[in-house]
Amino acid sequence: MRARRLALRKVIYLLGVPGTGKSSVGRELIGILEGECVDVSELVLGKGFYTTFDRQRATHVADVHRVREFLAQRAISPKGYLVVSSNFAVLVPGASDFFVFLLRCSPLVLMNRLRERGYDDKKISDNLIAELIGLSLDDACATFGSRKVVEIDITNLSLSLTASCIIEKLQQGAINSGDRIDWISRLEGDPALDDLLRFISRHTSAPELSSARRSIDESKPEAGAGTGWLGR
């Protein structure tokens, strides 16, 4: 007799650098949709699902295998959605019905948000670089495929408007339209961008920038199994 296949929830991935509101948006969505939300950063720290502490980046490195095992268990349900908010792309094993939303925020606004969190200048600079050059976009596209990754500019959106936007896109199938957010082009000519780049140049060296880019492009032996820096 063939074993009965377990029913899995639909999965909504909320991705982006720290400060883009993933956790708050996830809770807002679950207030509207049936299901549950898992904040990967809280999970990793709360359960001890990390392999080491990266002193250079001042963050824990997630044990991606254990995170995926936990998410696989939470996905076993015939009801509602599993919303996964994370700073890095991580696949829920076996979940074939999923949607990917990448929350983007203008680096000019993001800088103030990270300062309010108490991040030091080096950590702020590293996250601003990630947002400027789209490291989270590279990570998401490599893991899920570019067609599945839908970007949302949340810079001027409230929590409720962001959730409404996501629900509307879910109803439309949540497929990438082909438009991508390019902050350098959008902010070109704004004197504040020059100030931002000067700040970055003071706190992050050029070799570190190159290394940060390569860490996303080259470190994954398989999709969803890359290095999980929490960025907290």
Image (cartoon, rainbow, N blue to C red):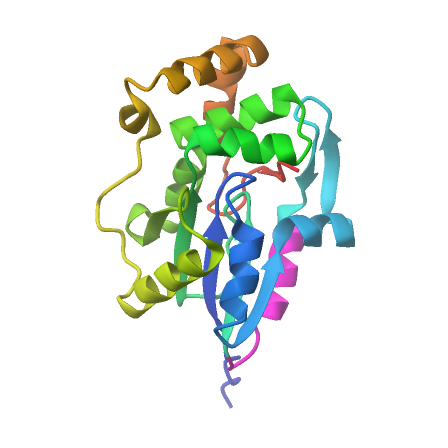
Q: Name the residue at the left extreme.
A: 178
* Rendering coords of residue 173 (x, y %): 28, 65
In the rendering, at what x and y percent does residue 28 appear? 52, 64
Whether residue 218 appears in this view of the structure is: no
Q: Position of residue 91 (x, y in %)?
A: 50, 54
Q: Is residue 69 magenta?
A: yes
Residue at the (41%, 46%) spot, across then down = 154
- Please, is residue 42 above or below residue 219 in the view? below
Is 44 left, or right, of 216 in this rendering? right
Q: Residue at position x 41%, y 42% from top?
A: 155
- Where, quadrant-wise, is the C terminus in this rendering? top right
Q: Main secondary structure of the magenta part?
A: helix
Instruction: Please check the rendered image and state whether residue 5 is part of the magenta-colored stretch, yes or no.
Output: no
Q: Residue at x 55, y 22 (%)?
A: 125
Q: Is residue 84 above or below residue 135?
A: below
Position of residue 15 relative to residue 76, above or below, is: above
Q: Residue at x 62, y 30 (%)?
A: 115
Most foreground residue, 98 or 127? 127
Q: Which residues are magenta?
A: 65-79
Residue 11 position within the rendered picture, expressed as x and y whole percent measured from the top left: 47, 65
* Residue nearer the viewer, 151 or 21: 21
